[in-house]
Structure formats: structure tokens, C-alpha cells
Image (cartoon, grey):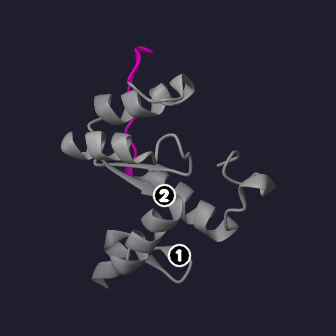
Amino acid sequence: MEVLLRPELGLDAADVLIFGLFLTRHSTFVRVTGRPQGCRDPKDDMFLETARVGEAQMLVTFDNDLLAFDLVERLLAEGVRVLSIGDFVRELREARIVVDDAVVCKADAAE
């Protein structure tokens, strides 16, 4: 979240908070080996490996190297959707997981 809140990224602080809250509720920790994953920026391979090892359904990023069309298509074929942070937050709002600027727990939604 520290990186996402850097002013030069221009991300909305409320979206970053929503993203962080969602992550803390739905994350699983995995071990990665550091093996190359085929990203055009090798520094981003750790994110691809994390998604693959963790059997993630989505990879959410603002990094253009990870949003590259060929990589997005390759990951989609593996069952991993790649979304920008804005698109991810928009999907959370459409699914009513986020209402206004609050993350809704399943227990809260049932009331």
C-alpha cells in the first residue's frame, strides 16, 4: 500500500484503501522461487510467479509491463485475469463488495 500511495502514481487514496482492505480479507501467502516467468521486466516476474503458485484468479496491477496485451492473454489462458487497479475496484463496486467507500463483509451483506 505504501507504493500505491506514492503521489507520482496518482491513484485515489480511497481506492488504494479499498484494495488493501480487500487484500487483507482474501489473501493467501505463498512461497516463490524466483524462477523467470516471462515478463518483459524481470523484476516483475515475482508477481507472475506469486499468481501462478498461489493459483490466483486475478492479478491486479498498475504496472504496464504486467498489463501488456500478450502477457494478459497468456495469463488468461492459464485462468488468471489481469486487471488494472481501477478496473478491479470497479468490479468490486459492481459486485457490491464495495459500497460507497466501504468494503462489505459477507455477514454485513446478509443483514
Residue 107, image x, y percentages: 32, 73
Amino acid carrying mark 2 in the image: Ser
Residue at image mark 1: 102
Q: Can residue 72 be seen here?
A: yes
Assess disc 2: are there few (<14), some (14-19) or many (≥20) residues with their C-alpha within 10 Å of its C-alpha.
some
Q: Earlier in the sequence, mark 2 or mark 1?
A: 2
Could you tell me which residue is drawn at 27 percent across and 39 percent down? 74
Circle nearer the viewer, 2 or 1: 2
Is 93 drawn above or below residue 19 in the view shown?
A: below
What is the spatial separation of the Cα atoms under label 2 and label 1, in whole angstroms? 20 Å
Left or right, 55 with respect to 98, comes to left
The boundaries of the magenta stretch are: 26-37
Residue 37, image x, y percentages: 38, 23
Residue at image mark 2: 84
Left or right, 6 with respect to 14, comes to right
12 or 41: nearer the viewer: 41
- Whether residue 70 is in magenta: the answer is no
